[in-house]
Image: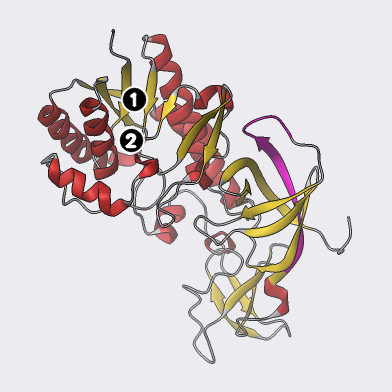
Amino acid sequence: MKKQKILVAMSGGVDSSVTAALLKKQGYDVTGVFMISWKEKGDCMWESEFNDAKKVADKLDIKIFTWDFSKEYKNKIFKYFIQAYKQGITPNPDTLCNKYIKFGSFLDQAKKLGFDKIATGHYAKIKKINKKYYLYHAKDTSKDQSFFLYELTEDKLAHIIFPLGKLTKKQVRKLAEKFNLPVSQKKDSYGICYIGEKNMQKFLGEYIKEKSGNIIDKNNNTLGKHNGLYHYTIGQRQRIKIGGTGPYFVIKKDYKNNNLIVTNNSEDKDLYIKNINIKNIHFINSKPELPISCLARFRNLQKLIKIKLYNNKIIFKTPQKAVASGQVIVFYKGKRVLGGGIIENYVTKNKI
């Protein structure tokens, strides 16, 4: 029987390396690809990551190629990322990376080259039930990445493998040692998708002109200065350096007057919201009849909360703290991902 040809996205990290090793052990015909998506301003961090991926490929005796998606990344993700901050909203580039790069351009190219499926090191599960494909929460709830995958489609799920979905991070680390992979002790990386860990204030300052203004409380008392409203998001408490009886939390960004409005009450009622508007709603499988009651989260790994979902609005069963425009909210039925949307703004009334 002919082996299935699997194309593995290899980033040079532990997760994608173990993914490739597991699939080869399971008898698949495995090929690796290292994706280059960020090459701005002489940033060559990808070169050291590729070297790690190449060492793993050599260890596993598989081929590895480099594919350059930097143009797609810049046009479809980074431009939106910067524009969103300019508009005062807080984007989530990881979901866009998955939509346009990993499960967009990468998957399309794999199909053209005759590969049966692609695989990544995401912590999520795909289940085939009655010839239909569904996305589920990973076994390791502390590493689950289903939140970032809500824009996948059933057709795409049929061509994807997530070998780590049934494993814990601890088990993956042990497997990396068992396979004697050269990256077995490598630390996990965080930060902006494909760009990596950055000082966000400094990084954004390279692309957005800073405009200083006042930091004020709800009584219009001036407490200090900010150097650009785009540096802050609702509920944020870090980097509000005004001293006094802190810590302070962002409750509003007043663009008309260029004021950052804060409170030193962590349970201030203005930090909570009951209803929100959402846009760009996407369902992985068929769209359910709305409205429906389901579960959701608007931050990765956040405890699932109860909501009622309408066509473009959501009512939280209990008011939620620090909900930021521009972020995504993902819907769940138990452990299955239904889909998600982008938080647009707040609903001022308690009824829809």
- Residue 263, quarter of picture: bottom right
Q: Residue at x 50, y 33 (%)?
A: 127
Left or right position of 211 against 348: left
Disc marking residue 39: 2
Confirm whether residue 93 shows in the render: no
Left or right position of 234 against 67: right
> Looking at the picture, how far across and down is residue 186, in whole percent?
19, 50
Q: Residue at x 40, y 44 (%)?
A: 123
Q: Is residue 340 above or below residue 7?
A: below
- Residue 37, quarter of picture: top left
- Report the span colored magenta: 273-287
Give the camera-side residue of 114 and 84: 114
The amino acid at mark 1 is Asp
Left or right position of 41 against 351: left
Give the camera-side residue of 98 and 73: 98
Q: Is residue 111 above or below residue 326?
A: above
Q: Residue at x 58, y 43 (%)?
A: 336
- Residue 11, quarter of picture: top left
Q: Residue at x 66, y 44 (%)?
A: 341
Confirm whether residue 84 shows in the render: yes
- The answer for how far apart the CA atoms under marks 1 and 2 are is 10 Å
The amino acid at mark 2 is Lys
| Prevalent SS, magenta region | strand
Give the camera-side residue of 351 and 230: 351
Residue designated by label 1: 68
Quarter that holds the N terminus: top left
